[in-house]
Amino acid sequence: MVEQTFWDEMTGGGADVRTVYGRVNEWLKSTPPDVLAARRTQAELLFRRIGITFAVYGEKDAAERLIPFDIIPRVIGQSEWSLMEKGLIQRVKAINAFLCDIYGAREILRAGLIPPDLVFGNPHFRPEMAGKRAPHDVWVHIAGIDMVRTGEDEFYVLEDNARTPSGVSYMLENREVMMRLLPDLFSNHRIAPVENYTDLLLNCLRSVAPPRSAGEPVVALLTPGPYNSAYYEHSFLADRLGVELVEGHDLSVRDGVVYMRTTQGPRRVDVLYRRIDDDFIDPLAFRPDSVLGVPGLLDAYAAGNVTLANAIGTGIADDKALYTYMPEIVKFYLGEEAILKNVPTWRCREADALKYVREHIGELVIKEVNGSGGYGMLVGPHASKAEIAEFEKKLVAQPDNYIAQPTLSLSTCPAFVENGVAPRHVDLRPFVLTGAEGSRVVPGGLTRVAMRAGSLVVNSSQGGGTKDTWVIEDA
Protein backbone atom coordinates (compact mmCIF):
# COMPACT_ATOMS: atom_id res chain seq x y z
CA MET A 1 0.00 0.00 0.00
CA VAL A 2 1.22 3.49 -0.87
CA GLU A 3 2.04 5.44 2.30
CA GLN A 4 -0.25 8.42 2.79
CA THR A 5 1.23 11.88 3.18
CA PHE A 6 -0.46 14.60 5.22
CA TRP A 7 -0.36 18.37 4.94
CA ASP A 8 0.73 20.00 8.18
CA GLU A 9 -0.88 23.34 8.99
CA MET A 10 2.19 24.67 10.81
CA THR A 11 4.88 23.70 8.32
CA GLY A 12 2.95 23.05 5.14
CA GLY A 13 4.90 19.81 4.94
CA GLY A 14 8.20 21.61 4.34
CA ALA A 15 11.08 22.80 6.47
CA ASP A 16 9.80 26.35 6.95
CA VAL A 17 7.07 27.33 9.38
CA ARG A 18 4.05 29.03 7.80
CA THR A 19 3.73 32.72 8.66
CA VAL A 20 0.48 32.36 10.65
CA TYR A 21 2.23 29.90 12.98
CA GLY A 22 5.42 31.96 13.39
CA ARG A 23 4.81 33.19 16.95
CA VAL A 24 3.32 29.90 18.09
CA ASN A 25 6.45 28.17 16.82
CA GLU A 26 8.68 30.61 18.74
CA TRP A 27 6.62 29.98 21.88
CA LEU A 28 6.95 26.21 21.50
CA LYS A 29 10.72 26.49 21.06
CA SER A 30 11.12 28.68 24.14
CA THR A 31 8.74 26.81 26.45
CA PRO A 32 10.15 23.76 28.30
CA PRO A 33 8.09 20.55 28.12
CA ASP A 34 7.50 20.56 31.87
CA VAL A 35 5.85 23.99 31.60
CA LEU A 36 3.59 22.74 28.80
CA ALA A 37 2.72 19.70 30.91
CA ALA A 38 1.89 21.93 33.88
CA ARG A 39 -0.38 24.09 31.72
CA ARG A 40 -2.17 20.99 30.44
CA THR A 41 -2.73 19.79 34.02
CA GLN A 42 -4.05 23.22 35.00
CA ALA A 43 -6.43 23.12 32.04
CA GLU A 44 -7.76 19.72 33.14
CA LEU A 45 -8.29 21.01 36.68
CA LEU A 46 -10.18 24.03 35.36
CA PHE A 47 -12.43 21.86 33.20
CA ARG A 48 -13.15 19.55 36.15
CA ARG A 49 -13.97 22.52 38.35
CA ILE A 50 -16.26 23.96 35.69
CA GLY A 51 -17.88 20.55 35.27
CA ILE A 52 -17.56 20.39 31.48
CA THR A 53 -17.95 16.64 30.98
CA PHE A 54 -19.82 14.23 28.76
CA ALA A 55 -21.04 10.64 28.85
CA VAL A 56 -21.20 8.03 26.09
CA TYR A 57 -24.51 6.21 25.71
CA GLY A 58 -24.25 2.43 25.64
CA GLU A 59 -21.14 2.15 27.80
CA LYS A 60 -21.47 -0.07 30.88
CA ASP A 61 -20.42 2.51 33.42
CA ALA A 62 -21.39 5.56 31.27
CA ALA A 63 -19.20 7.62 33.62
CA GLU A 64 -18.86 11.34 33.05
CA ARG A 65 -15.50 12.12 31.48
CA LEU A 66 -13.44 15.06 30.32
CA ILE A 67 -12.73 15.64 26.67
CA PRO A 68 -8.94 15.88 26.35
CA PHE A 69 -7.85 19.47 25.77
CA ASP A 70 -4.75 20.35 23.77
CA ILE A 71 -3.09 23.61 24.81
CA ILE A 72 -1.45 24.32 21.43
CA PRO A 73 -3.91 26.45 19.45
CA ARG A 74 -4.87 25.84 15.86
CA VAL A 75 -4.19 28.98 13.81
CA ILE A 76 -6.05 30.03 10.65
CA GLY A 77 -5.26 33.18 8.66
CA GLN A 78 -8.01 35.71 7.99
CA SER A 79 -7.83 35.22 4.21
CA GLU A 80 -8.23 31.45 4.63
CA TRP A 81 -11.12 31.98 7.00
CA SER A 82 -12.88 34.44 4.69
CA LEU A 83 -13.12 31.76 1.98
CA MET A 84 -14.52 29.23 4.45
CA GLU A 85 -16.99 31.75 5.89
CA LYS A 86 -18.37 32.60 2.46
CA GLY A 87 -18.75 28.93 1.60
CA LEU A 88 -20.42 28.08 4.92
CA ILE A 89 -23.03 30.82 4.56
CA GLN A 90 -23.74 29.68 1.00
CA ARG A 91 -24.15 26.07 2.11
CA VAL A 92 -26.54 26.81 4.98
CA LYS A 93 -28.59 29.10 2.74
CA ALA A 94 -28.97 26.21 0.28
CA ILE A 95 -29.89 23.78 3.08
CA ASN A 96 -32.64 26.12 4.26
CA ALA A 97 -33.96 26.48 0.71
CA PHE A 98 -33.92 22.68 0.31
CA LEU A 99 -35.90 22.18 3.53
CA CYS A 100 -38.44 24.84 2.52
CA ASP A 101 -38.87 23.02 -0.77
CA ILE A 102 -39.16 19.39 0.35
CA TYR A 103 -41.75 20.34 2.97
CA GLY A 104 -43.42 22.60 0.41
CA ALA A 105 -43.58 22.55 -3.39
CA ARG A 106 -40.91 19.81 -3.82
CA GLU A 107 -39.62 21.34 -7.03
CA ILE A 108 -36.24 19.61 -6.74
CA LEU A 109 -37.98 16.23 -6.80
CA ARG A 110 -40.08 17.20 -9.81
CA ALA A 111 -36.87 18.29 -11.53
CA GLY A 112 -35.51 14.77 -11.02
CA LEU A 113 -32.31 15.90 -9.30
CA ILE A 114 -32.81 13.75 -6.19
CA PRO A 115 -34.43 10.28 -6.02
CA PRO A 116 -37.73 10.69 -4.12
CA ASP A 117 -37.10 7.62 -1.96
CA LEU A 118 -34.05 9.35 -0.45
CA VAL A 119 -36.45 11.94 0.92
CA PHE A 120 -39.64 10.02 1.70
CA GLY A 121 -37.81 6.91 2.92
CA ASN A 122 -35.52 8.89 5.18
CA PRO A 123 -36.17 8.28 8.90
CA HIS A 124 -35.68 11.99 9.60
CA PHE A 125 -38.22 13.17 7.03
CA ARG A 126 -41.28 14.34 8.95
CA PRO A 127 -44.47 14.23 6.85
CA GLU A 128 -46.19 16.08 9.71
CA MET A 129 -44.24 19.18 8.62
CA ALA A 130 -45.43 19.06 5.01
CA GLY A 131 -47.13 22.32 4.08
CA LYS A 132 -45.88 24.10 7.18
CA ARG A 133 -43.77 27.21 6.72
CA ALA A 134 -40.95 28.05 9.09
CA PRO A 135 -40.89 31.69 10.29
CA HIS A 136 -38.84 33.75 7.83
CA ASP A 137 -38.23 30.47 5.93
CA VAL A 138 -35.44 29.60 8.36
CA TRP A 139 -35.46 25.91 9.28
CA VAL A 140 -31.86 25.62 10.45
CA HIS A 141 -31.00 28.43 12.85
CA ILE A 142 -27.91 26.76 14.29
CA ALA A 143 -25.79 24.63 11.96
CA GLY A 144 -22.55 22.83 12.70
CA ILE A 145 -20.70 22.06 9.48
CA ASP A 146 -17.86 19.55 9.86
CA MET A 147 -14.90 20.43 7.66
CA VAL A 148 -11.49 18.96 6.92
CA ARG A 149 -8.44 20.39 5.25
CA THR A 150 -6.10 18.46 2.99
CA GLY A 151 -3.87 21.23 1.62
CA GLU A 152 -3.16 24.94 1.69
CA ASP A 153 -6.23 25.80 -0.37
CA GLU A 154 -8.12 22.51 -0.10
CA PHE A 155 -11.15 22.51 2.21
CA TYR A 156 -13.86 19.85 2.20
CA VAL A 157 -17.17 19.53 3.98
CA LEU A 158 -17.29 16.16 5.70
CA GLU A 159 -20.88 16.33 6.91
CA ASP A 160 -23.69 18.71 7.82
CA ASN A 161 -25.29 18.90 11.28
CA ALA A 162 -28.69 20.53 11.06
CA ARG A 163 -30.66 18.86 13.87
CA THR A 164 -29.19 19.80 17.23
CA PRO A 165 -25.48 20.45 16.63
CA SER A 166 -23.41 20.34 19.80
CA GLY A 167 -19.93 21.40 20.87
CA VAL A 168 -20.21 25.17 21.00
CA SER A 169 -19.71 25.19 24.79
CA TYR A 170 -16.27 23.63 24.24
CA MET A 171 -15.42 26.34 21.70
CA LEU A 172 -16.25 29.01 24.29
CA GLU A 173 -14.67 27.31 27.29
CA ASN A 174 -11.50 26.47 25.32
CA ARG A 175 -11.05 30.15 24.57
CA GLU A 176 -11.55 31.17 28.22
CA VAL A 177 -9.03 28.60 29.43
CA MET A 178 -6.43 29.68 26.84
CA MET A 179 -6.82 33.33 27.82
CA ARG A 180 -6.34 32.42 31.47
CA LEU A 181 -3.40 30.02 31.11
CA LEU A 182 -1.48 31.56 28.21
CA PRO A 183 -2.12 35.32 28.34
CA ASP A 184 1.29 36.23 26.88
CA LEU A 185 0.85 34.03 23.82
CA PHE A 186 -2.69 35.28 23.43
CA SER A 187 -1.65 38.94 23.62
CA ASN A 188 0.95 38.42 20.86
CA HIS A 189 -1.79 37.77 18.30
CA ARG A 190 -4.79 39.70 17.02
CA ILE A 191 -7.39 36.97 17.39
CA ALA A 192 -10.99 37.25 16.21
CA PRO A 193 -13.34 36.91 19.20
CA VAL A 194 -15.74 34.05 19.82
CA GLU A 195 -17.05 35.35 23.16
CA ASN A 196 -19.94 37.17 21.44
CA TYR A 197 -21.42 33.89 20.15
CA THR A 198 -24.21 33.83 22.73
CA ASP A 199 -25.13 37.46 22.02
CA LEU A 200 -25.36 36.62 18.31
CA LEU A 201 -27.37 33.48 19.08
CA LEU A 202 -29.86 35.32 21.28
CA ASN A 203 -30.35 38.03 18.65
CA CYS A 204 -30.79 35.31 16.02
CA LEU A 205 -33.45 33.50 18.07
CA ARG A 206 -35.35 36.67 18.91
CA SER A 207 -35.34 37.74 15.26
CA VAL A 208 -37.37 34.67 14.22
CA ALA A 209 -40.05 34.99 16.89
CA PRO A 210 -43.65 34.64 15.66
CA PRO A 211 -45.23 37.89 14.44
CA ARG A 212 -47.83 37.60 17.22
CA SER A 213 -45.19 37.99 19.94
CA ALA A 214 -45.91 40.95 22.18
CA GLY A 215 -42.91 43.00 23.30
CA GLU A 216 -39.48 41.41 23.57
CA PRO A 217 -39.73 37.74 22.57
CA VAL A 218 -39.36 35.20 25.37
CA VAL A 219 -36.76 32.52 24.59
CA ALA A 220 -36.25 29.27 26.50
CA LEU A 221 -33.91 26.31 26.03
CA LEU A 222 -35.63 22.91 26.03
CA THR A 223 -33.45 20.06 27.33
CA PRO A 224 -34.14 16.34 27.77
CA GLY A 225 -32.75 16.72 31.30
CA PRO A 226 -29.64 16.05 33.37
CA TYR A 227 -29.22 12.47 32.14
CA ASN A 228 -28.56 13.64 28.58
CA SER A 229 -24.90 13.39 27.52
CA ALA A 230 -24.85 17.06 26.45
CA TYR A 231 -26.70 18.43 29.49
CA TYR A 232 -23.69 20.49 30.56
CA GLU A 233 -23.86 22.37 27.27
CA HIS A 234 -27.61 22.94 27.63
CA SER A 235 -27.24 24.49 31.09
CA PHE A 236 -24.12 26.41 30.03
CA LEU A 237 -25.87 27.99 27.04
CA ALA A 238 -29.05 28.82 28.94
CA ASP A 239 -26.95 30.59 31.56
CA ARG A 240 -24.90 32.50 28.97
CA LEU A 241 -28.02 33.42 26.98
CA GLY A 242 -29.82 34.56 30.11
CA VAL A 243 -32.87 32.38 29.32
CA GLU A 244 -34.74 29.71 31.24
CA LEU A 245 -33.57 26.10 30.97
CA VAL A 246 -36.74 24.02 30.81
CA GLU A 247 -37.76 20.38 30.54
CA GLY A 248 -40.93 19.11 28.95
CA HIS A 249 -42.84 19.02 32.23
CA ASP A 250 -42.10 22.75 32.72
CA LEU A 251 -44.10 23.60 29.59
CA SER A 252 -47.74 23.31 28.59
CA VAL A 253 -49.83 24.23 25.57
CA ARG A 254 -53.15 26.00 26.01
CA ASP A 255 -55.23 27.29 23.10
CA GLY A 256 -52.28 26.77 20.77
CA VAL A 257 -49.88 28.83 22.90
CA VAL A 258 -46.84 27.53 24.80
CA TYR A 259 -46.42 28.51 28.44
CA MET A 260 -43.72 27.76 30.98
CA ARG A 261 -44.12 27.53 34.72
CA THR A 262 -42.56 30.33 36.73
CA THR A 263 -42.79 31.46 40.34
CA GLN A 264 -44.98 34.32 39.09
CA GLY A 265 -47.31 31.95 37.24
CA PRO A 266 -47.45 30.80 33.57
CA ARG A 267 -45.41 32.82 31.10
CA ARG A 268 -45.76 32.66 27.33
CA VAL A 269 -42.78 31.30 25.37
CA ASP A 270 -42.19 32.61 21.86
CA VAL A 271 -39.02 30.75 20.83
CA LEU A 272 -37.79 27.34 21.96
CA TYR A 273 -34.15 26.49 21.36
CA ARG A 274 -34.76 22.78 21.53
CA ARG A 275 -32.14 20.14 22.22
CA ILE A 276 -34.59 17.23 22.07
CA ASP A 277 -34.81 14.96 19.02
CA ASP A 278 -37.94 15.05 16.86
CA ASP A 279 -39.15 11.64 18.06
CA PHE A 280 -39.51 12.82 21.64
CA ILE A 281 -40.55 16.45 21.29
CA ASP A 282 -44.34 16.00 21.18
CA PRO A 283 -45.97 12.72 22.29
CA LEU A 284 -49.23 13.66 20.55
CA ALA A 285 -47.49 13.95 17.17
CA PHE A 286 -44.57 11.53 17.38
CA ARG A 287 -43.66 8.91 19.99
CA PRO A 288 -46.62 8.58 22.37
CA ASP A 289 -44.40 7.07 25.08
CA SER A 290 -42.16 10.15 25.29
CA VAL A 291 -42.06 11.83 28.69
CA LEU A 292 -39.47 14.39 27.52
CA GLY A 293 -41.57 16.49 25.19
CA VAL A 294 -44.54 18.83 25.29
CA PRO A 295 -48.00 17.57 24.27
CA GLY A 296 -49.48 19.85 21.62
CA LEU A 297 -46.19 21.59 20.72
CA LEU A 298 -46.54 20.79 17.01
CA ASP A 299 -50.05 22.30 16.97
CA ALA A 300 -48.70 25.47 18.60
CA TYR A 301 -45.99 25.61 15.94
CA ALA A 302 -48.50 25.06 13.13
CA ALA A 303 -50.66 27.85 14.56
CA GLY A 304 -47.71 30.24 14.29
CA ASN A 305 -47.47 30.81 18.03
CA VAL A 306 -43.99 29.45 18.71
CA THR A 307 -40.75 29.12 16.78
CA LEU A 308 -38.64 25.98 17.16
CA ALA A 309 -34.92 26.25 16.62
CA ASN A 310 -34.04 24.16 14.83
CA ALA A 311 -37.35 23.27 13.18
CA ILE A 312 -38.74 19.75 13.27
CA GLY A 313 -37.64 17.72 10.26
CA THR A 314 -34.24 19.31 9.70
CA GLY A 315 -32.47 16.01 10.38
CA ILE A 316 -32.97 14.97 6.79
CA ALA A 317 -30.24 17.46 5.86
CA ASP A 318 -27.79 15.45 8.01
CA ASP A 319 -28.25 12.35 5.87
CA LYS A 320 -24.98 11.25 4.28
CA ALA A 321 -26.66 10.03 1.10
CA LEU A 322 -28.36 13.41 0.56
CA TYR A 323 -25.02 15.04 1.41
CA THR A 324 -23.71 13.67 -1.88
CA TYR A 325 -26.20 15.88 -3.72
CA MET A 326 -25.19 19.13 -2.02
CA PRO A 327 -23.36 20.56 -5.08
CA GLU A 328 -26.56 20.04 -7.10
CA ILE A 329 -28.68 21.47 -4.26
CA VAL A 330 -26.56 24.63 -4.12
CA LYS A 331 -26.75 25.02 -7.90
CA PHE A 332 -30.51 24.36 -8.04
CA TYR A 333 -31.56 26.86 -5.38
CA LEU A 334 -28.88 29.53 -5.60
CA GLY A 335 -27.74 29.28 -9.22
CA GLU A 336 -24.12 29.15 -8.01
CA GLU A 337 -21.32 26.64 -7.89
CA ALA A 338 -20.60 25.35 -4.41
CA ILE A 339 -17.68 27.22 -2.85
CA LEU A 340 -16.89 24.38 -0.44
CA LYS A 341 -16.28 20.99 -1.98
CA ASN A 342 -17.84 17.73 -0.93
CA VAL A 343 -15.62 14.74 -0.29
CA PRO A 344 -15.86 12.43 -3.37
CA THR A 345 -18.48 9.86 -2.39
CA TRP A 346 -19.82 6.56 -3.72
CA ARG A 347 -23.49 5.86 -3.08
CA CYS A 348 -23.59 2.16 -2.33
CA ARG A 349 -27.27 2.05 -3.29
CA GLU A 350 -26.06 2.33 -6.92
CA ALA A 351 -24.90 -0.96 -8.44
CA ASP A 352 -21.74 0.37 -10.09
CA ALA A 353 -20.73 2.22 -6.93
CA LEU A 354 -21.32 -0.87 -4.78
CA LYS A 355 -19.17 -2.95 -7.12
CA TYR A 356 -16.33 -0.42 -6.91
CA VAL A 357 -16.59 -0.16 -3.12
CA ARG A 358 -16.45 -3.93 -2.66
CA GLU A 359 -13.41 -4.15 -4.93
CA HIS A 360 -11.61 -1.37 -3.00
CA ILE A 361 -13.07 -1.86 0.47
CA GLY A 362 -9.65 -1.96 2.12
CA GLU A 363 -8.85 1.53 0.81
CA LEU A 364 -12.08 3.37 1.69
CA VAL A 365 -14.00 4.79 4.62
CA ILE A 366 -17.54 3.39 4.65
CA LYS A 367 -20.25 5.09 6.73
CA GLU A 368 -23.87 4.54 7.62
CA VAL A 369 -25.99 7.24 6.00
CA ASN A 370 -27.56 8.06 9.38
CA GLY A 371 -24.54 7.23 11.55
CA SER A 372 -22.83 9.67 13.89
CA GLY A 373 -20.15 9.87 16.55
CA GLY A 374 -17.67 7.75 14.60
CA TYR A 375 -19.83 4.64 15.02
CA GLY A 376 -21.17 2.33 12.32
CA MET A 377 -18.22 2.95 10.03
CA LEU A 378 -15.26 1.09 8.57
CA VAL A 379 -11.87 2.74 8.06
CA GLY A 380 -10.54 0.27 5.50
CA PRO A 381 -6.79 0.98 5.73
CA HIS A 382 -6.88 0.56 9.53
CA ALA A 383 -9.20 -2.47 9.64
CA SER A 384 -8.23 -6.14 9.93
CA LYS A 385 -9.21 -8.70 7.29
CA ALA A 386 -11.78 -10.13 9.68
CA GLU A 387 -13.32 -6.69 10.32
CA ILE A 388 -13.48 -5.98 6.59
CA ALA A 389 -15.12 -9.35 5.86
CA GLU A 390 -17.71 -8.81 8.59
CA PHE A 391 -18.48 -5.27 7.47
CA GLU A 392 -18.83 -6.34 3.84
CA LYS A 393 -21.64 -8.70 4.85
CA LYS A 394 -23.58 -5.76 6.28
CA LEU A 395 -22.80 -3.66 3.22
CA VAL A 396 -24.12 -6.31 0.81
CA ALA A 397 -27.21 -6.92 2.96
CA GLN A 398 -28.16 -3.21 3.10
CA PRO A 399 -26.28 -1.22 0.45
CA ASP A 400 -28.80 1.64 0.68
CA ASN A 401 -27.61 2.20 4.24
CA TYR A 402 -24.02 3.09 3.29
CA ILE A 403 -21.84 5.56 1.45
CA ALA A 404 -18.11 5.27 0.88
CA GLN A 405 -15.36 7.86 0.63
CA PRO A 406 -11.63 7.85 0.04
CA THR A 407 -9.42 7.95 3.13
CA LEU A 408 -8.72 11.66 3.13
CA SER A 409 -5.29 12.97 4.03
CA LEU A 410 -6.61 15.07 6.92
CA SER A 411 -4.30 17.91 7.81
CA THR A 412 -2.28 17.76 11.00
CA CYS A 413 -1.56 20.39 13.64
CA PRO A 414 1.01 20.30 16.44
CA ALA A 415 -0.40 18.86 19.67
CA PHE A 416 1.13 18.38 23.09
CA VAL A 417 0.91 14.67 23.86
CA GLU A 418 2.58 12.31 26.33
CA ASN A 419 5.87 12.19 24.42
CA GLY A 420 6.03 15.92 23.64
CA VAL A 421 4.89 17.98 20.67
CA ALA A 422 3.74 15.87 17.72
CA PRO A 423 1.41 16.26 14.72
CA ARG A 424 -2.16 15.04 15.14
CA HIS A 425 -5.05 14.98 12.69
CA VAL A 426 -7.81 17.57 13.08
CA ASP A 427 -11.18 18.60 11.73
CA LEU A 428 -13.21 21.77 12.29
CA ARG A 429 -16.84 22.42 13.22
CA PRO A 430 -17.74 26.07 12.57
CA PHE A 431 -21.15 27.22 13.80
CA VAL A 432 -23.44 29.13 11.44
CA LEU A 433 -26.29 31.18 12.94
CA THR A 434 -29.19 32.12 10.67
CA GLY A 435 -31.99 34.49 11.61
CA ALA A 436 -34.32 36.96 9.96
CA GLU A 437 -31.40 39.20 8.97
CA GLY A 438 -29.25 36.50 7.39
CA SER A 439 -26.36 34.30 8.52
CA ARG A 440 -23.33 34.88 10.73
CA VAL A 441 -20.38 32.58 11.37
CA VAL A 442 -18.39 32.89 14.58
CA PRO A 443 -14.70 32.97 13.53
CA GLY A 444 -13.03 29.64 14.13
CA GLY A 445 -15.36 27.11 15.67
CA LEU A 446 -14.50 23.87 17.40
CA THR A 447 -11.34 22.04 16.36
CA ARG A 448 -11.45 18.36 17.23
CA VAL A 449 -8.17 16.48 17.35
CA ALA A 450 -7.37 12.77 17.14
CA MET A 451 -5.12 12.40 20.17
CA ARG A 452 -3.91 8.93 19.18
CA ALA A 453 -0.96 8.80 16.79
CA GLY A 454 -2.09 7.99 13.25
CA SER A 455 -5.79 8.04 14.12
CA LEU A 456 -8.21 9.84 11.82
CA VAL A 457 -11.17 9.59 14.23
CA VAL A 458 -11.61 12.86 16.11
CA ASN A 459 -14.93 12.16 17.88
CA SER A 460 -14.83 12.60 21.64
CA SER A 461 -16.66 9.30 22.09
CA GLN A 462 -13.74 7.64 20.32
CA GLY A 463 -10.97 9.30 22.34
CA GLY A 464 -10.65 12.56 20.41
CA GLY A 465 -9.89 15.89 22.05
CA THR A 466 -10.38 19.58 21.32
CA LYS A 467 -8.22 22.69 20.93
CA ASP A 468 -8.80 26.42 20.67
CA THR A 469 -9.11 27.75 17.12
CA TRP A 470 -7.60 31.14 16.36
CA VAL A 471 -8.51 33.20 13.32
CA ILE A 472 -5.80 35.86 13.13
CA GLU A 473 -4.95 38.75 10.86
CA ASP A 474 -2.69 37.78 7.98
CA ALA A 475 0.87 38.98 8.43
Image (spheres, rainbow, N blue to C red):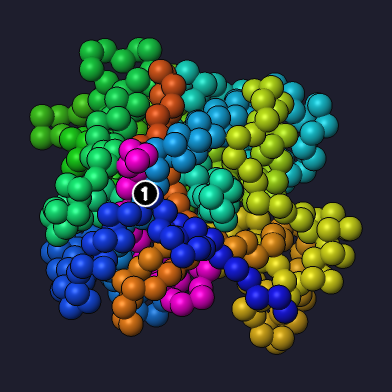
Specify the farthest residue to the left.
264
Task: State the quadrant of the N terminus.
Answer: bottom right
Whether 296 is among the magenta residues is: no
Give me the residue at 14% from left, 59% from top. Answer: 181
Q: Is residue 151 above or below residue 263?
A: below
Of residues 63 and 430, the one nearer the viewer is 430
| Quarter assignment of residue 440 | top left
Q: Within 10 Å of the Cα at label 1, are there few (<14), some (14-19), or many (20+) other Cα atoms?
A: many
Give me the residue at 26% from left, 68% from top. Answer: 29
Residue 305: x and y in percent read 39, 20
Q: Secondary structure at mark 1?
A: helix
Whether 462 is among the magenta residues is: yes
Left-right relation of 117 to 178: right
Give me the residue at 70% from left, 67% from top. Answer: 364
Left-right relation of 262 to 304: left
| Quarter assignment of residue 419 | bottom left
- Please give the residue where the numbered disc 1 appears in the rendered image: 20
Q: Which residues are magenta?
A: 448-475
Residue 146: x and y in percent read 50, 50
Q: Is residue 311 above or below residue 247?
A: above
Left-right relation of 257 to 98: left
Of residues 151 and 125, the one nearer the viewer is 151
For badge 1, the amino acid type reads Val
Give me the residue at 50% from left, 35% from top. Answer: 83
Task: State the quadrant of the C terminus.
Answer: top left
Residue 357 in view: yes
Of residues 143 and 302, the one nearer the viewer is 143
Residue 61: x and y in percent read 34, 79
Residue 423: x and y in percent read 43, 69
Residue 444 in view: no
